[in-house]
Image (tube, rainbow, N blue to C red):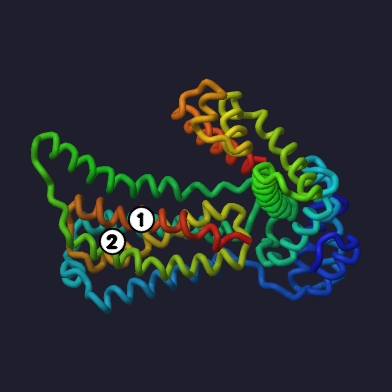
Amino acid sequence: MTMQSHPDTFIDSLVDDLKPVTPLRQRAGMTRALLALAIGTFLVVTAFGMRPDLRSGHLDPMFLLPTGLFLVLALATAWATIDMARPFVGTRRDGWAWTALMAAVLPGAALGLIVSEALRGQTLALDRGGIFCLTFGTLIGLLTGGALVFWLRRGAPASPAKAGLYTGVAAGAAGIFAVSLHCPHNDLIHIGIWHGGTVILSGLIGRLTLPRLLAW
Amino acid sequence: MIADEATLSRLAALGQRGDRQAYSAMLTACRSWLLRYFRRKVAPEQIDDLVQETLLSLHRKLASYDPARPVTPWLAAIARYRFVDHLRFAYRAAVEAELDGDVPASDDDQALVARLSLDRLFEALPDAQQRAIELVKIEGFSISEASATTGQSESLVKVNIHRGLRRLAALIERI
């Protein structure tokens, strides 16, 4: 379609091109995101196995709390991301940020612990096993990220930069939730740095790489 | 808007189901609204292009309309997106045109229009930031030349450019 054709001709050409479309429904988008999260979780548990205390049913609070926080963060951010596919002036989608702030307490507390120990002249070692969580959390998160990108490309996100950041955070939180079901660590340093780091890394990747893909 | 919100919502929902008559009526009403919207924002010769680009985006993204919501805020969000995109394009064209003396006359005209829009945005910046951006980003001065011209230190020129551009970006997003 060429620009600057006669207004009526232009509108007629759009009308001629009309095909029925299914409106994007929030629930349909959320179902896809949940499906991606479930597939990711299934892959992690199948490939690497479930953590021992989860298998035996003796759950540790240091597993339950952060894992629950990451799950809620993944769901809240995915919800906001899916809603971005339907542009609307005057909508606020910052509710997920409060969940993100709550989850940010984990890396914040871990850093605080490291700094306070360093001030007392002691060094807390970062376990190298955390690389596994960071790597696989990010990779498994791609499933959720992919589902969200697919959804956003069907819609019209008015701010591709924000949509990229939201997608990255949701993907990272979903990925690390899945990996948490395998990861046997219960210490704050590991969870704060490596699990929290996965969400931060994914958010950065989403913010830097996705806007071009989401522009329309 | 000629049609009221409830009528527009009904027309848009029918359009989503493939009703051509309803869709045509909706597009005509949207076109009137867009003409008024862009008239306040861009030079007259750019209005038709922007209106058509926005209608085309609306057509491609028809599925993104939620029939449970009013049409105008949806249309406004699409129009704003296209307008911000237009400003980005105009800004790039202005910078390229000002750095390249061999551009043809028609491009100069476009650059002038873009420059007028930029001047309006620049009014919101403090003088020091405005001057630093103009010298380095538009007139092509080096940081040290801009520093010598303005009397600002080199690091202050850099800071002013950074802060000014960030503020401009925020302004464009808010328009």
Does residue B23 appear left or right of residue A138 in this picture? right
Determine the chain carrying the residue at label 2: A
Q: Residue at x 71, y 33 (%)?
A: B120
Towards the viewer: B115 or A120: B115
Viewer-closest of A167 and B128: B128
Relative height, residue B107 to residue A10 (above, below): above
Confirm whether residue B77 shows in the render.
no
Q: Quadrant of residue A183?
A: bottom left
2 or 1: tag closer to the N-terminus: 2
| Image location (x, y in percent) of residue A116 | 16, 37
Residue B92 image point, x, y percent:
65, 48
Callout 2 amino acid = Leu
Marks 2/1: CA–CA distance = 9 Å
According to the image, label 2 marks what residue?
Answer: A134
Seen in the image, is A76 located left or right of residue A129?
Answer: right
Mark identifier at residue A201: 1
- Residue B69 on image: x %, y %: 69, 56
